[in-house]
Image (cartoon, rainbow, N blue to C red):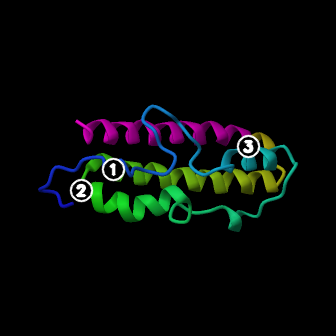
Amino acid sequence: MGPNTSARWSGNGPPSYRRGQKPPLAPGARPARIRVIEGHEQLETTKVANHHQCVFGQWYDAQGHSELGHLPAFREIGAHHERVHALAKEIVGLANQGRIDDAKRLMGDFEACRGRLFETLDRVYRDNTR
């Protein structure tokens, strides 16, 4: 849809998304970070998916962009999503260096950014289902 059309949430929104719910951005993603911080698992930072590789990112780049890309709030989602992945990678890197307290502190930033992503996603949903 172009900017001159009235975009409506098609019902084919992001995977696993339901308005008002806050699912993880990728199945199992948060528990893996926690396991790394706790020392139960090793994960190389190169294995942390970027914002184009995860299921949500694939939806965002393709169907989401074609249907909702003209909306400023949709572009905000992209910025939040990219930051979430950057923070996840940084958290894993810190944990791998043994800087567990720093990794735990950064989890607060991660959760705040993730919350902003879903608040913005809710706004796009509300604006496009009226």
Q: Secondary structure at mark 1?
A: helix
Q: Does residue 23 sit above or below 47 in this rendering?
A: above
Q: Is residue 117 left or right of residue 108?
A: left
Q: Nearer the viewer, mark 1 or mark 3?
A: 1
Task: Name which of mark 1 and mark 3 comes first in the sequence.
Answer: 1
Residue at point 68%, 45% (across, down):
30
Residue at point 36%, 57% (across, down):
64
Q: Is residue 99 something one can see in this rendering?
A: no
Q: Which mark is residue 70?
A: 2
Callout 3, which amino acid? Asp
Residue positioned most to the bottom: 46
> What is the span of residues highlighted in magenta in the rendered image?
102-130
The residue at which mark 3 appears reads as: 102
Q: Quadrant of the C terminus?
A: top left
C-alpha separation, residue under disc 2 versus residue under disc 3: 38 Å
Residue sitting nearer the eye, 30 or 67: 67
Rendered location of residue 19, percent (x, y): 42, 35
Rendered location of residue 61, percent (x, y): 41, 64
Label 1: few (<14), some or many (≥20) within 10 Å?
A: many
Rendered location of residue 29, percent (x, y): 67, 50
Rendered location of residue 129, percent (x, y): 27, 39
Q: Secondary structure at mark 2?
A: loop
Residue at point 70%, 66% (across, down):
47
Q: Are marks 2 and 1 in contact (CB under 8 Å)?
A: yes
The residue at which mark 1 appears reads as: 74
Q: Secondary structure at mark 3?
A: helix
Q: Main secondary structure of the magenta part?
A: helix
Label 3: few (<14), some or many (≥20) within 10 Å?
A: some
Callout 1, which amino acid? Phe
